[in-house]
Image: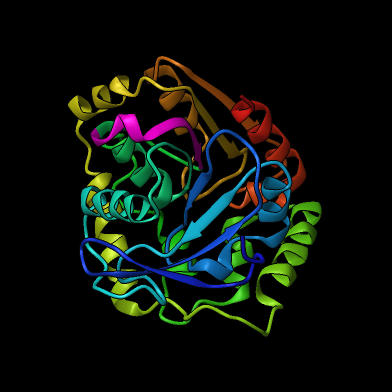
Amino acid sequence: MADSFSNQVVRAGNGVDYTYRDIGSGGTVPIVLLQHFRGNLDNWDPALIDALASCRRVITFNNVGVASTTGTTPNTIDQMARDAVTFVTALGLEVVDILGFSIGSFVAQEIALMRPALIRKLVLASSAPSGAAGMHGWAPEVIAAVGKPEADAGGYLKVFFARTPSSQRAGGEAAGRIFGRTENLDDPTNWDTREAQYDAVCSWGIPNHSLLARVGAIDMPVFIANGDSDPMILPHYSYLLAGLIPQAQVKIYPDSAHGFLFQHHSEFAADVEAFLVD
């Protein structure tokens, strides 16, 4: 295994060179993490990765066209899921646990539906089902904060952390861990990736009540989590998902927003480990 900031590359069957990081050991199967909107390898909080990797093997990667991975970012969740499966296959893994965060949680749902035998257990962080009312694009203040050409710390703190002094303080600490590094950095994501990913998010969120039934076919254990003040993917969608997925459990973390898993990194990692434990 490499250290947590060591980039590796694997050539997959689709001809794409996927960049990934591989840290930790233990557990029956590794856990593969799917990143948030516009995020690259560096946008995972090292404190969360280290906490997860203290008990098991953790793999983070850039999907097709994202940051240092080659190819063109697709504009559908379905194709992103197929590309993620191709990456996992290229690593020679037959069964994994998956943690999907934000848009990554949408991709995770699709993988669970299209390739259920690949996933042992599923973690959905800041998630919503396809077709849910109110998910057709994000609120104007949210996309203005995180969707502008040059993302900045102010927009990040506004969306990923609650407006309370305690959450903003935790956000500053997380931002320091995530953005304070200067060595072994990943490539940034580009505008084409931003556009393709937001197209995929909007298509996923087109209201369609009949699509809600799809997630009822997810038949592995699922842990659903969010912050109580997430303005990007409201916490009531976590309860909606939990009511639709047969083997789901849900937890909402207090005084936190979209980045609850970074703010509450120790608690969340412990909850994930308790859920995944063999």
At 22% from the left and 43% from the top, the residue drawn is 206
Residue nearest the viewer, comparing 137 with 217:
217
Look at the image and give the residue range highlighted in magenta. 114-125
The quarter in which the N terminus is drawn is: bottom right
| Location of residue 219 (image quadrant) | top left
At 69% from the left and 39% from the top, the residue drawn is 268
Relative height, residue 167 to residue 40 (above, below): above
Pinpoint residue 231: horizontal percent, then vertical percent.
52, 49
Relative height, residue 97 to residue 42 (above, below): above
Viewer can see residue 102: yes
Pinpoint residue 165: horizontal percent, then vertical percent.
80, 56
At 38% from the left and 54% from the top, the residue drawn is 138
Is 246 in the magenta? no
| Location of residue 225 (image quadrant) | top right
Name the side, left or right, on which 127 lies relative to 259.
left
Colour scheme = rainbow
Q: Residue furthest bottom?
A: 182
